Image (spheres, helix red, strand yellow):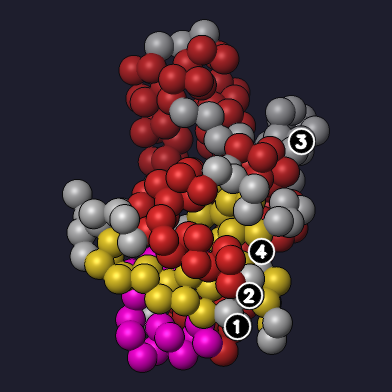
Amino acid sequence: MIADQRVLVVDDHPVVRRGLRAMLEGESWVAAVTEAATVAEAVRAVAVHPVHVVAMDVGLPDGDGIDAAGRILRAAPGTRILILTMDDDESVVQRALRAGAHGFLLKDTDPQVVVDSLRTVAAGGVVLGPRTAGALLTGLRTSPARVPAPFDRLSEREREVVIRLTAGDSNGQIARRLGLSEKTVRNQLSGIFAKLGMTDRVRVALSARDAGLRA
């Protein structure tokens, strides 16, 4: 359980900020909600009153929300950041995650899902909406003849699991798609993370793309 979380909502549209703020203020895990409309305001807000989790827009009047996320994380590494944007371009998703964001959702996501995702991120989880997961990992369905490191450490079945988990599937969905039991999927994921030296599904996805795993 998490509690007493301070949330910062960064968006240049007052209606968006206030609507999300109104919903968050009704959540038992939220202690306080503050707002910012620009990069400068966001960076200053975190410096003056440290927050636990930030809902960050990308297109801001004085700069880029992803750059702002990077600045915030360098100044306050413990801050958790969920990117909210209308842009589901693959390069934007990758850039946000490489900047250190802990989640990425499109603005047309149901508001309650956004609130729930902020809670997940605040609790230490990672959120990647299904549409952005698809944009991020298009083409990871076919392994090349020569598998690049470190994915050459994995069996063919493990690489199939990597492709499914990076597409945003739950363990249950992976099990159904690949004809496995959920226990087998859990065991294979443990082996995959150990072989790759990673514990974060999103980081595995980004590494797979960087390694050239694509159709």
Instruction: Name the front one of labels 2 and 3.
Output: 2
How far apart, in angstroms, are the residues tagged by discs 2 and 3? 34 Å
Q: Amino acid at mark 1?
A: Thr
How far apart, in angstroms, are the residues tagged by discs 4 and 1? 19 Å
Indicate yes or no whether the magenta region holds residue 84. no
Q: Residues within 10 Å of mark 1 (few under 14, many from 20)?
A: many
Q: Which mark is residue 12?
A: 2
Residue span colored magenta: 41-55
Residue at 57% in and 54% down: 104
Pointer 2 and pointer 4: residues touching (CB < 8 Å)?
no
Pointer 3 and pointer 1: residues touching (CB < 8 Å)?
no
Task: Name the spot of residue 141 as percent of width and height, x first.
Answer: 71, 28
Residue under label 1: 38
Residue closest to the eye, 62 or 78: 62
Indicate yes or no whether the magenta region holds residue 43. yes
Which secondary structure, mark 2? loop
Q: Which mark is residue 139?
A: 3
Instruction: Name the front one of labels 3 and 1.
Output: 1
User: Which tag, 3 or 1, sits closer to the chain's start?
Assistant: 1
- In this image, 207 relative to 143: left or right? left
Residue at 47% in and 28% down: 170
Q: Is 33 situated above or below 109?
A: below
Which secondary structure, mark 3? loop
Q: Amino acid at mark 4?
A: Arg
Instruction: Name the front one of labels 2 and 4.
Output: 2
Q: Amino acid at mark 2?
A: Asp
Residue under label 4: 95
Q: Residues within 10 Å of mark 3 (few under 14, many from 20)?
A: some
How far apart, in angstroms, are the residues tagged by discs 3 and 4? 18 Å
How far apart, in angstroms, are the residues tagged by discs 2 and 4? 21 Å
Task: Name the spot of residue 161 as percent of width and height, x first.
Answer: 54, 27
Task: Name the spot of residue 83 as percent of width and height, x first.
Answer: 56, 61
